[in-house]
Image (cartoon, rainbow, N blue to C red):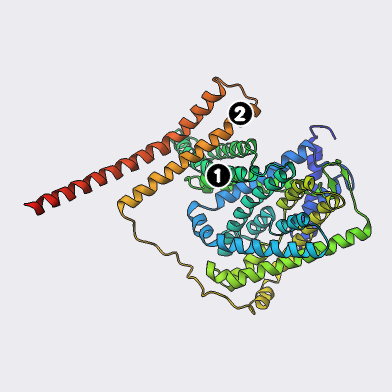
Amino acid sequence: MPEILPLTSIGIIIILAIVLSILVKKSGQNAVIGYIIAGFILGPMVLNFLNPHDPLVVGFGELGLFILLFYLGLEMSFKDFLKAGSTSIGLAILDMIACAGIGFIIASISGFSLLFSLVLGMMTFSTSTAVVAKFALDKGLIQHNAVKHAISIFILQDFLGIVIIVFLTSFSSSTADTALGLGIAAIVFAVSAFFVVAKFSKIAEEWLTSNGFGHTEITLFALGIGLIVATLGTFLGLSTAIGAYFAGFALAETRSGDKIKKDVGFLRDFLLVFFFVAFGTTLFFNNTTKAIQVPEIHVLFFLFAIAAAISAGAIIMHSVVTHLFGAKFGLNREDSTLVAILLVPLGEFVIIIATSALPALKGVESTLLSPIAFMLILITIVLFQPLYNLKELHQKIFEILPSLFAPVPQKTIVQEHTPETITQLKKFVGNLFIILCLAWVTVLLYNAIPRFNIPLLYSRQVTAFLIFCFFASFPFVLSMKALKKLIEHAAKKERTIRRFAFTETK
């Protein structure tokens, strides 16, 4: 294939993907399967029209994932995230432990090694954000209470997925402290990205609006900011998913958030086709040898049986956890069923985990991991739509399980305002934490600047220092204002005490 494919090639990809997705939808399945089959047919396994390493496949695949997560960030406001995330984190941890446990047990019983079984257990809770988000958007469920809980779980899964990937990579290279460092880097980068994009976007939005520019320019600005943040994340060794999501998350706080979301809607649908087609080209493709590798028939049957058993076990664990503990986290029986079903389809992180774990595996197991990963994704995606169609039956079956907790009221409890000193103390500590995150990211950028390949007006040290001062100036001013109010309050209180003591003496 040439390095830059002609427009006719893009047309062929779109037509085949759309035709297959229509046929798949007619059979009652998710259209995403049609896109993946199109990539499989066009890939090296059948027609060899596309290769997983082709610039078009790689570029459009990354753009598809970026625009999806960017759009999801726009869909959920900061308040919605806090409301859903604070109640979902416990449910997410319980679900991950249960699913990883069942995956590990099935793999161990099947005779695989400890490391191989651990990797399969990690794959079991790697739900596909792309598949579920596309499904929720098409069904108009994105604002549903259960969907918000599920998305909050996906966010935590993505963070853990990155830590797991780095852990597996560092395990194979014997650098044990790398995983912890990258996990912390992901957190501080997310905080820094949200703060910088939110503040800078509001300023840019006001300037564009006051100078007569419309939402088209604001949308283009938003996409540009999102791409820059996502790219910075990759330079720091992080997934583009973090930068894309938190850039959209921050832009949702602007007045133009809804307009931006409408403008990128078609772009999202267009690029998602290429994202899933790109994924389809990787089926049974060995990234190490850059060639197709299909196991023997009896081995394929054995692997399929394992993948089916793990998929069934994960589906049961999702349902058991959500119905036993869902009430504790604000879910009724219907919402518990929907969350359990939304957690079924596995996706992109399964592939990434498999690729990262391969260097640490030896012998036959190194050739079996990728086929099992592909089968896990295909089985769970195929089962996802029928499970959703049978959600009423699913609910009746698992309603047999008792709820371990009384239902939590869905209405948010509004607490009274805290005293002035506590409010200012929170502002002071919060802004200091943001400054710390910005400082950490600056250090990471300092080490990554040589890979940017851009000319610098000043030395690397001076450039990193100026970048930090520019972005940290605003939270620094806010923290100093809060500290000033704390000092003034303390001084006022001291004067009151002295005056009272003087009165008592008299």
Quadrant hosting residue 288: top right
Q: Of the two numbered discs 1 and 2 on the same chain, state the one appearing first in sequence.
A: 1
Assign the N terminus to one quadrant of the image: top right
Image coordinates for residue 236, horizontal then vertical, percent: 62, 37
The foreground one among 430 and 106 is: 106
Quadrant hosting residue 3: top right
Q: Residue furthest bottom?
A: 400
Relative horizontal placement of residue 481, taking residue 76 as reference (left or right): left
Q: Secondary structure at mark 2?
A: helix
Image coordinates for residue 231, horizontal then vertical, percent: 63, 37
Quick check: can you spot residue 16?
no
Q: Which residue is mark 1?
A: 190
Q: Residue at x 86, y 41 (%)?
A: 289
Q: Residue at x 85, y 60 (%)?
A: 303
CA–CA distance in space, label 1 to label 2: 19 Å
As displayed, is residue 145 above or below residue 155? below
Q: Are marks 1 and 2 in contact (CB under 8 Å)?
A: no
- Residue 449 is marked as 2
The foreground one among 36 and 113 is: 113
Near mark 2 (Cα within 10 A), the count class, few <14, some 14-19 or many ≥20, is some
As displayed, is residue 82 above or below residue 476? below
Near mark 1 (Cα within 10 A), the count class, few <14, some 14-19 or many ≥20, is many
Give the mark count: 2
